[in-house]
Image (cartoon, grey):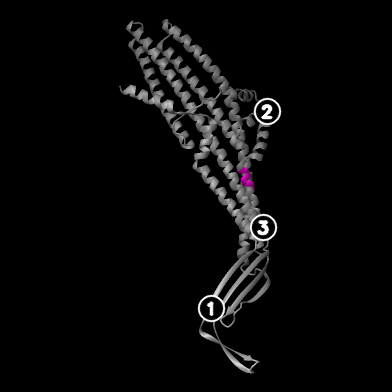
Amino acid sequence: MKYFTVLIISISTLLSAETVSLEKAKASALENNYGYAIAKETLNYSELSTKSAFAGFLPTASFSAGYTLYTPEVEISSFNFTTMSSVSMTQEDRTAFSIRVSQPLFTGGKVWNNYKIASGSEEMSRNTLTSEMFKLLADVESQYLSVLEAQEMMKIAEESIVLSKKNEETAKIKFDSGLISRADFLKNSSARASSEVSLVNAEKILQLARISFSNITGLKEFELETLEHEKCEDIIKGLCNMEPADITLKVQRLREVALKNNIDLKNAVLGREINEKKISVSKGSFLPTLSLSYSTEWSKTNLTDEYSNSGAVALSASVPILPLYDNYITLEKSRIDLKRSELSEKQLEDNISTLINTYLYTLVSGSKQLQSSITAVELADETYKSVEERANSGLSTEDELNTARLSLIQAKYDQTSVYYSILKTKTELMRVLGITDGNELLKLF
């Protein structure tokens, strides 16, 4: 009853599971991944910072109002020419309104360069968002492949159990008939037990792969679409036929694509340009500033019934004198930052070249290994069938049969491992090249 219940639950889960394609998994990850969401918010923040920096070009205006109550009151004396006598008045309060508008004319280039720095930072945030997307999509594809690989590995483990159980049953018949010893029969039983352990390990690896895939995509119950192996046959055949000279030319071509499209390199270039602008900002600290302003005020006291107006236009210039040493230190630090960014850019270019070489040679060697592993599986399968026939006829030992079975299973493990290793390496190469469409990579080969 217990096993029947478990079977019903498993069937229900399978039927309710959604079949997910690679593209759908990528879309789900982009919708649910926190890292990608954080990168989008960072871009929004950078866009606002650029708008704030642009505001430095615009004039500033302020409005102020004030009311003054005099205690004690102010006595004002004046002369009345009509009566030819002096008059005393008491000023009790004063009400005033004023507007001031100021426009910077020259700031030593600091406003302009700060705006360009903010624009560069916004572009870096946009590139970072794209880079986060590339990385996320590559991780999703890698996890997707890991689940498919684990599924195939488990199928091979199940096949191993089927073969080992079949051999054990045959050995039991031989043992009961007195054709083999108990030791030979126990060897088959031991082989069956080892196959069961391998299946348990394969199930554990599959569950862990599914958990990792679920975490990165946000999908809970799912079944993955299998990949069409034929899609990679052309590229694998092309890689197998590559000579060292061809690999060198291909590396150079891929490097040109990466230098044009790689997001991290684009950000490194932007970082260098931003540091160049920071040097200009630091130099601007030694230059004078010039601004134009206009102010006007309306005021009245208790002695008058109407507001009086007065305005002024001012052209102001400011020349920095002290502290010059701090400005000099800031300038030198900006130059050091520029040098560091230049070195980081060159280092990144070298790292990209190294990765392209590594991935391409891995693809070439992996493709050759895959072709060899396909042949190995065919030969191992033929060998196992031959040994099985001989063992059933009493011409081969149980050790030879188990050895042939293990060789067949290991050959299938190797073939599956190499195949998915090629696909994962291809995904990493695409990320370095800055492309997301597999067809674009096929054109490069």
Which numbered mark, 2 or 3, is in the foreground of this view? 3
Amino acid identity at mark 2 = Asp
Q: Residue at x 38, y 23 (%)?
A: 197
Which numbered mark, 1 or 2, is in the foreground of this view? 1
The residue that disc 2 covers is 246
The answer to whether any part of residue 87 appears in the image is: yes
Q: Is residue 12 left or right of residue 36?
A: left
The answer to which of 222 and 402 lies nearer the viewer is 222
- Is there a contact, CB below 8 Å, between mark 1 and mark 3? no
Amino acid identity at mark 3 = Trp
* Residue 88, image x, y percentages: 57, 90
Q: Is residue 67 left or right of residue 161?
A: right
The mark nearer the N terminus, 1 or 2, is 1
Q: Residue at x 50, y 12 (%)?
A: 382
Would you place residue 4 above or below residue 79 in this image? above
The residue that disc 1 covers is 68
Q: Secondary structure at mark 2?
A: helix
Q: Secondary structure at mark 3?
A: helix
Q: Which residues are magenta?
A: 264-269
The quarter of the displayed image where residue 366 is located: top right
